[in-house]
Image: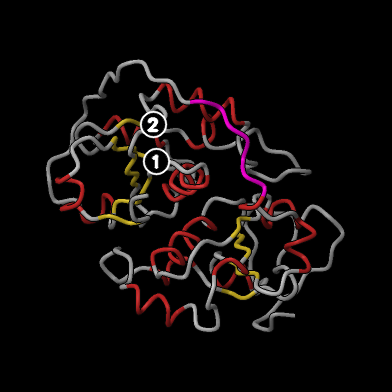
Amino acid sequence: MIPPVVDRAWLARHPEAVLADVRYYLDGRSAAEAYAAGHIPGAVRVDMDAVLADPPSAEAGRHPLPAPERFAAGLAAAGIGDGATVVAYDDAGGAMAGRLVWLLRMLGEDAALLDGGLRTWNGELSAEAPEPPPARFSPRPWPKEALATIEEAATGECVIDARAGERYRGETEPIDPRAGHIPGARSLPLTANLAPDGRFLAPDQLRARFAGIDDAAAVISYCGSGITACHNLIALEHAGLGRGRLYPGSWSQYSNTDRPAAVGDGRR
């Protein structure tokens, strides 16, 4: 399997890779319009809501995992078939594109984030959408061993929260019903995985950031709705610490229950 993070030089050596634009915004901006205005030449667009998530609900969260058939159909329509090598990017350091990368890697497919994404892309952009040939992506169930339930997230010994510190501490909650975090969870905002230029920290720097974690197999990662939590999982793998598990419902599911919530810097 290819590394979880690749750079532009790697991409140049692998022209067979399918580039995927996975920009997504929570502030009302249109990702489709951003793609139409300019994207890396040859990149196909993969829509977060239509392909990478099922419809939201209080019971499952804001971005439940997509049904395997929904995911497969969306990728096939974008020209991504079984066995394709996919390199995904966004304009947020991989915070959004990590969802596609994680889902594909979870299924054993070759997928990676383009380090730096659009922020460090110094080439020309294109407004021309490619017309990929028909593809076949086989629907497969999501591996249970790669995922954590709400009960496992509530009782896990190594649970990490990828949201901004102020949301973890309960100082603000702009989206979900309650503020705070899952008791026992450790605050590890995804933005700290990145250097000031938007690229990932070096593996040794990431290992220092994840001090106390020797094997990601014990880790359960969550965020607001299961999207940006994937960034921490990719960072753990990039650091050489192995693979953790995703809690898909994340805070958007948890906060819709009567389970206890913690606030402040303390983990409990």
Task: Name the residue carrying label 1.
Answer: 22
Quadrant assignment, res 267 = bottom right
Please name which of the two marks, 1 or 2, marks the residue nearer to the observer: 1
Give the alpha-carbon distance from disc 1 to disc 2, as whole Å. 10 Å
**Image quadrant where one finds the C terminus:** bottom right
Give the image's coloring scheme: secondary structure
Quadrant assignment, res 31 = top left
**Residue 64's spot in the image, x, y percent?**
65, 41
Quadrant assignment, res 127 = top left
Residue at disc 1, secondary structure: loop
Asked if 93 appears above or below 97 in the picture, the reply is below
Which residue is pictured at 23% across the width and 55% down the height?
Answer: 7
Give the amino acid type for the residue marked by disc 1 in the picture. Val
Which residue is pictured at 35% across the width and 68% down the height?
Answer: 194
Mark linked to residue 119 = none
Q: Does the magenta stretch include residue 41?
A: no
- Predominant SS along the magenta part: loop
110 vs 259, nearest the viewer: 110
Q: Do tag 1 and tag 2 residues touch (Cβ < 8 Å)?
A: no
> Would residue 175 be found to the left or right of residue 126 on screen?
right
Residue at disc 2, secondary structure: helix
Magenta highlight range: 138-144
Mark linked to residue 32 = 2
